[in-house]
């Protein structure tokens, strides 16, 4: 349920309303937009008398919300959320590039790529220290050493870093990581999501291989319900009957999510297609669809990459992608970069 307040409501009357609602075991989410203040009521709202609230002189209107996600719902929070990730502000009309190798392989590799992608226009550095792999015999990542290498690359370039967590027991290792990624396989690892809801750090939440948009938002809700509202959503393709591409990139998810939630939405065309020659056109399409940013895999030697080389761009190809995407971005996006 949402309660839309009139302009400049009497503070004492508002405090009394909130106190009464809390006495009914209702949690209150206050959203102050440019023109409207909204109270989002979270909990068993069946005990709330809509007619009684509507009759209050500080109330404009009252509406019941049927969607099960409340914190992530745009109806509760009409304005776009803008997250400040170590100086990089994602959402609200800006556009950002997150780039780097699928997996951390060595200090030299990561630092070289970090310098290249920064020079080309990247705003954040991605890199996998812990790698979930389908085969138990595949390279699983450098783990703690990988995070140490990413932090050295951050010192070298100043780029905030993004890396994937596998289990809540690893949270302490991510204290200096600027944004923690929850991969597609862990999107519904609810115990992990609950723990991430207790920390004060941005979370990049990727859509699961076969998850609906509502399921993605419910996973975001797990994090936000714990008190951490710093969530960025990532469309990275879903599994369909098509076998030529690694996944099928669902670009309709971008405008749909934008209508459903106030959270920033980025796109990962690398994992979505699995083929390097498709990354640039799909990145351009994602930008045109209204995404808040892109996550691109970049490797200085894709042919010899330990993980996902076939979908990785060279630094030169990434620079070309950035240039092409910037040419099709709306002027407002370019001016806010």
Image: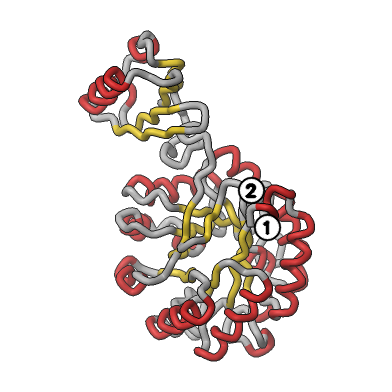
Asked whether the residues under the numbered discs 1 and 2 touch, taking CB atoms below 8 Å apart as contact, a structural biologist would say no
Q: Can residue 267 be seen in this view?
A: no
Q: Residue at x 30, y 71 (%)?
A: 172
Q: Which residue is drawn at 50% across and 76% down?
A: 128
* Position in image of residue 195 (x %, y %): 31, 58
Q: Distance between the residues labelled 1 and 2?
A: 11 Å
Q: In which quarter of the image is the C terminus?
A: bottom right
Which residue lies under the disc numbered 1? 249
168 and 37: which one is in front?
37
Tell me the SS state at disc 1: loop
Splitting the image into 4 quarters, where does residue 306 fall? Answer: bottom right
Q: In which quarter of the image is the N terminus?
A: top left
For disc 1, the neighbor class at 10 Å (few under 14, some 14 to 19, many from 20) is many
79 and 101: which one is in front?
79
Find residue 254 and name its label: 2
Q: Can residue 247 be seen in this view?
A: yes
Find residue 236 and name its label: none
* Position in image of residue 115 (x %, y %): 60, 81
Q: Relative to 92, is 22 above or below?
A: above
Residue, far left? 23
19 and 308: which one is in front?
19
Q: Residue at x 43, y 36 (%)?
A: 68
Tell me the SS state at disc 2: helix
Front label number (1 vs 2): 2
Q: Is residue 141 left or right of residue 325?
A: left
Q: In this view, does 290 lie to the left or right of 128?
A: right
Q: How many labels does the image show?
A: 2
Q: Relative to 336, is 110 above or below?
A: below
Q: Residue at x 44, y 22 (%)?
A: 4
Among numbered discs 1 and 2, the one appearing first in the sequence: 1
């Amino acid at each position: 349920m949402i309660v839309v307040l009139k302009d400049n409501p009497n503070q004492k009357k508002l405090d009394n309303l909130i106190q009464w609602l809390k006495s009914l075991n209702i949690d209150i989410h206050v959203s102050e937009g440019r023109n409207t203040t909204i109270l989002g009521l979270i909990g068993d709202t069946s005990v709330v008398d809509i007619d009684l609230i509507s009759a209050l002189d500080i109330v404009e209107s009252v509406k019941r919300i049927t969607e099960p996600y409340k914190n992530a719902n745009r109806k509760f929070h009409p304005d776009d959320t803008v997250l400040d990730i170590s100086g990089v502000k994602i959402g609200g009309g800006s556009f950002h590039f997150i780039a780097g190798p699928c997996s951390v392989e060595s200090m030299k590799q990561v630092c070289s790529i970090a310098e290249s992608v920064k020079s080309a226009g990247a705003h954040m550095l991605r890199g996998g220290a812990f790698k979930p792999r389908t085969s138990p015999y595949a390279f699983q990542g450098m783990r703690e050493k990988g995070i140490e290498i990413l932090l050295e690359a951050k010192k070298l370039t100043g780029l905030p870093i993004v890396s994937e967590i596998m289990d809540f027991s690893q949270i302490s290792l991510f204290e200096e990581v600027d944004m923690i990624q929850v991969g597609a396989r862990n999107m519904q690892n609810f115990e992990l999501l609950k723990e991430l809801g207790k920390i004060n750090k941005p979370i990049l939440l990727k859509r699961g291989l076969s998850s609906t948009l509502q399921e993605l938002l419910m996973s975001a809700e797990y994090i936000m319900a714990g008190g951490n509202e710093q969530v960025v959503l990532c469309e990275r393709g879903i599994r369909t009957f098509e076998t030529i591409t690694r996944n099928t990139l669902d670009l309709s998810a971008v405008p749909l999510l934008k209508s459903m939630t106030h959270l920033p939405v980025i796109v990962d065309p690398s994992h979505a297609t699995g083929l390097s020659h498709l990354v640039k056109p799909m990145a351009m399409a994602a930008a045109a669809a209204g995404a808040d940013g892109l996550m691109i895999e970049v490797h200085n030697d894709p042919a010899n990459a330990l993980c996902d080389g076939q979908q990785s761009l060279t630094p030169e190809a990434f620079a070309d992608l950035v240039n092409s995407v910037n040419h099709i971005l709306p002027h407002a996006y370019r001016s806010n970069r």
